[in-house]
Amino acid sequence: MPHLNLEYSDNLSELNVDLLLLRLNHALVGSGQFADEADIKSRAQAFAKYRVGTAPGERAFAHVRLAILSGRSEQVKQQLSGSLLAVLQEAIPANAGLDVQLCVEVLDIDREPYAKLRLPAE
Amino acid sequence: MPHLNLEYSDNLSELNVDLLLLRLNHALVGSGQFADEADIKSRAQAFAKYRVGTAPGERAFAHVRLAILSGRSEQVKQQLSGSLLAVLQEAIPANAGLDVQLCVEVLDIDREPYAKLRLPAE
Amino acid sequence: MPHLNLEYSDNLSELNVDLLLLRLNHALVGSGQFADEADIKSRAQAFAKYRVGTAPGERAFAHVRLAILSGRSEQVKQQLSGSLLAVLQEAIPANAGLDVQLCVEVLDIDREPYAKLRLPAE
């Protein structure tokens, strides 16, 4: 915890994904909500098969899903989504030929049945 | 919003994914629940690594996860899942050698912390 | 129902994914919670793009998300996550050079709008 999934359409071909993931993680660390930076597990997936809406025209999306243990306030969640959206916006500038949507969702992981184990490097 | 993820086993090798995504989006537009067709962001992923159950025998699945902003009634959600399942069923006919499962799930996105930005094509 | 998604960083290069999925499914069957073994639909995805935390150093993760129809008790969910974590742990031993995190999350699928169809092999 937390888990972050970045999903995006692969027509965002100039995206520096490694850098974006690092910046998203820094934004999460900077929020002060997570005790150990190593807890933040982020991953990204480009989709070759996608469809935005039904009208013709080139469209793109990038969607961040942040899953955190239940119990945080709406205000904290809004701060988290706002700071992640700002990182997305910086990484994905407006593009002359492309209609781009950026979204950030925050969801709870049910705390009780969450099970975890860490195997440190020896 | 809404976000649609189609996940399927890659032994559904004859699936026309582009057409299926377009039809799923048309079904969502046709529901009348979404003001702007461009809001519908659908993507598909084929899985090469999957396992249905524990018994031997060739099995397949296609699973649609529709995530919508919280606040809609159970009845509206059931109509949405029913219409998406009908689209799946039309796209994936019964197959002589394959035991196929089709599923549609509707889940809420917490409305408060959802953040979004649209960068229109210039 | 149930749906299981295994996500892992692709630096777990020696992982036998097919065997792991089968063992996870056997653990679910063994829980006695699911009437038909064929209902268990598990899939795995390796991520080439991931970032654990912000500090340098090689890190890895494997994350199981189990989605089940709503209505089961916290106790049942904890038993499920515990048994899945045990399977993960057996499949992914401590690795001299790698800091590995194993996680299991259990979440509810809203029962009312869930739609399903099975097309048996003929």
Image: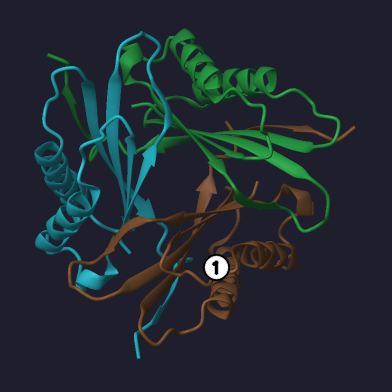
Chain colours: A brown, B cyan, C green
Provide residue C24's location: percent of width, then percent of height: 52, 19
Q: Quadrant of the N terminus of chain B?
A: bottom left
Residues C71 and A90: in front is A90
Residue at left offset 11%, top offset 32%: B93
Q: Is residue B23 above or below residue A79?
A: above
Residues A40 and C62: in front is C62
Q: Is residue B70 above or below residue A110?
A: below
Provide residue A94's location: percent of width, then percent of height: 45, 85
Pointer 1: what residue?
A81
Residue at left offset 32%, top offset 58%: A50
Q: Residue furthest bottom?
A: B122
- Using the rendered image of the protein, determine whether residue B66 is visible from the camera's viewpoint: yes
Provide residue A98's location: percent of width, then percent of height: 36, 80
Q: Is residue C80 left or right of residue C10?
A: left
Q: Residues within 10 Å of mark 1 (few under 14, many from 20)?
A: many
The quarter of the picture where residue B119 lies is bottom left
Q: Is residue B95 above or below residue A73?
A: above
Residues B16 and C69: in front is B16
Q: Quadrant of the C terminus of chain B?
A: bottom left
Callout 1: helix, strand or loop? helix
Residue at left offset 9%, top offset 40%: B90
Q: Is residue B47 left or right of residue C51?
A: left
Q: Residue furthest right?
A: A122
Mark 1 belongs to chain: A
Provide residue A119's location: percent of width, then percent of height: 79, 31
- Using the rendered image of the protein, determine whether residue A35 is visible from the camera's viewpoint: no
Residues A119 and B32: in front is A119
Q: Is residue A20 left or right of residue B100?
A: right
Q: Is residue A18 above or below residue A82?
A: above
Amino acid at circle 1: Ser
The quarter of the picture where residue B120 lies is bottom left
- Give the number of marks: 1
